Image (cartoon, rainbow, N blue to C red):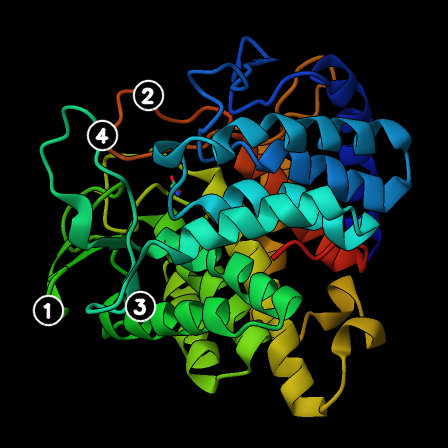
């Protein structure tokens, strides 16, 4: 427990300075220790643009310091341009508006935030393919050669909470029904017999039914892109929290068991669990996201065993007896020791994050790695603003 608070306080001390330097940006990565800015017209729809606001809301929940709230609000308002851009919106609407508008609404009941989030949820629901019972992933872009009409991706599991929230908020079950149908399709078609998950599955977009899977951001078809495993693990446990359907708990458990079994001795996570031995590229984001999912899985099991809210009863390392909590702490402590840049003159937190195995560039800083590292610490400290 001491470790959790020490680390969280250290993060906050650094972020207080970073947030002032990047107050009017929406960062994705950094060059020479300085955040970039994705809030210009060409980049405002970038799928990661909700995480900076989410970090600010978490830090506001932790400290009550006004500048964090103001930066979060500025980010949320900048994203309004995306709501008027049909091609800019996609399956990642949850990543854009849950950590911004929904977080704001949960804290402040701001009606403008509710409006934004419901518009985003409506657009996400509109991507549902009724024959295949899945939410379509990407739009087609100019010059793309693939036909994306039948494509769904495991990452989408993390966006379903926007639909659960919309149903809860409007008392209209349509949004949640779509989320549940997508989660059922994903449980059946994305999770392999060993508990690993596909990144992309192509369905027949007119009749339904799986056609094939693709390796996507991993190293090959049939391989195990680690961030995809983490999205699946965290995404299924979130669907369980919203619905209490044991299928989703079991799905999260199977993915978690596979993930834990494949954590290397070093505790550092590769880009793909199946990458060639001589390839050493890492993805710290996968470790941070998986840690969040493992903490929720540990809490769900504990709650099922005791029949009560465990979060209030025990915290942090006191929950170590649970295999999922132990794995989460191992991932987070390894990151804190070896993959966090504690220099407060440089903007990013996590080092060695990788967007995709076949990209030209690997092992740099990525904002959602920082977000989930902070979120995991907030969960352990019992201070999290629940975003999903
Ligand atoms: N959702 C895309 C990614 O994880 O890179």
Q: Is residue 340 visible?
A: yes
Q: Which residue is mark 2?
A: 361
Q: CA distance from mark 4 to mark 2?
A: 22 Å
Q: Which residue is mark 1?
A: 207
- Looking at the image, is mark 2 or mark 3 earlier in the sequence? 3
| Secondary element at image label 3 | helix
Could you tell whether 184 is left or right of 115 in the image? left
Q: Nearer the viewer, mark 1 or mark 3?
A: 1
Note whether 336 is above or below 367 in the view shown: below
Q: CA distance from mark 2 to mark 3?
A: 30 Å
Pick the residue in front: 105 or 67. Answer: 105
| Secondary element at image label 2 | loop
Percent position of residue 197, x then y? 29, 62
Q: Nearer the viewer, mark 4 or mark 3?
A: 4
User: Could you tell me if the residues under marks 4 and 2 are in contact, i.e. CB atoms within 8 Å?
Assistant: no
Q: Which residue is mark 3?
A: 186
Q: CA distance from mark 1 to mark 3?
A: 17 Å
Percent position of residue 52, x then y? 63, 32
Q: Does the Cβ of the disc 2 residue fall within 8 Å of ligand 1?
A: no
Most extreme residue toward the top is: 32
User: Could you tell me if the residues under marks 4 and 1 are in contact, i.e. CB atoms within 8 Å?
Assistant: no
Q: Residue at x 68, y 69 (%)?
A: 320
- Looking at the image, is mark 4 or mark 2 earlier in the sequence? 4
């Amino acid at each position: 427990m001491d470790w959790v608070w020490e680390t969280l306080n250290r993060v906050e001390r650094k972020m207080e300075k970073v947030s002032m330097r990047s107050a009017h940006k929406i960062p994705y990565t950094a060059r020479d220790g300085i955040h970039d800015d994705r809030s210009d017209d060409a980049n405002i729809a970038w799928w990661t643009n909700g995480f900076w606001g989410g970090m600010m809301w978490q830090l506001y929940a932790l400290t009550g310091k006004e500048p964090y709230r103001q930066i979060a609000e500025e980010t949320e308002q900048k994203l309004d341009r995306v709501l008027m851009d049909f091609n800019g919106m996609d399956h990642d609407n949850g990543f854009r508006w849950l950590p911004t508008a929904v977080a704001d609404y949960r804290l402040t009941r701001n009606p403008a935030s509710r409006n934004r989030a419901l518009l985003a949820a409506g657009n996400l629901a509109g991507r549902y393919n009724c024959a295949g019972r899945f939410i379509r992933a990407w739009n087609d872009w100019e010059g793309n050669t693939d036909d994306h009409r039948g494509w769904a991706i495991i990452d989408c599991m993390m966006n379903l909470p926007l639909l659960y929230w919309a149903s809860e908020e409007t008392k209209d079950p349509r949004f949640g029904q779509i989320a549940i149908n997508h989660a059922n399709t994903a449980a059946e078609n994305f999770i392999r017999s060993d508990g690993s998950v596909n990144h992309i599955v192509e369905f027949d977009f007119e009749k339904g039914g799986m056609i094939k899977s693709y390796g996507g951001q991993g190293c090959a078809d049939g391989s195990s892109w680690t961030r995809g495993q983490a999205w699946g693990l965290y995404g299924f446990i979130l669907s369980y929290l919203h619905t209490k359907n044991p299928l989703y708990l079991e799905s999260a458990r199977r993915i978690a068991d596979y993930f834990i079994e494949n954590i290397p001795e070093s505790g550092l996570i590769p880009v793909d669990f199946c990458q060639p031995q001589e390839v050493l590229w890492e993805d710290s984001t996968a470790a941070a996201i998986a840690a969040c999912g493992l903490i929720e899985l540990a809490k769900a099991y504990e709650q099922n065993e005791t029949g009560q809210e465990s979060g209030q009863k025990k915290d942090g390392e006191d929950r170590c007896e649970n295999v999922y909590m132990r794995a989460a702490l191992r991932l987070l402590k390894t990151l804190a020791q070896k993959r966090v840049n504690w220099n407060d003159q440089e903007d990013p937190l996590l080092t060695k994050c990788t967007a995709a195995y076949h990209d030209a560039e690997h092992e740099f800083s990525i904002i959602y790695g920082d977000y989930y590292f902070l979120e995991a610490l907030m969960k352990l400290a019992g201070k999290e603003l629940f975003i999903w």
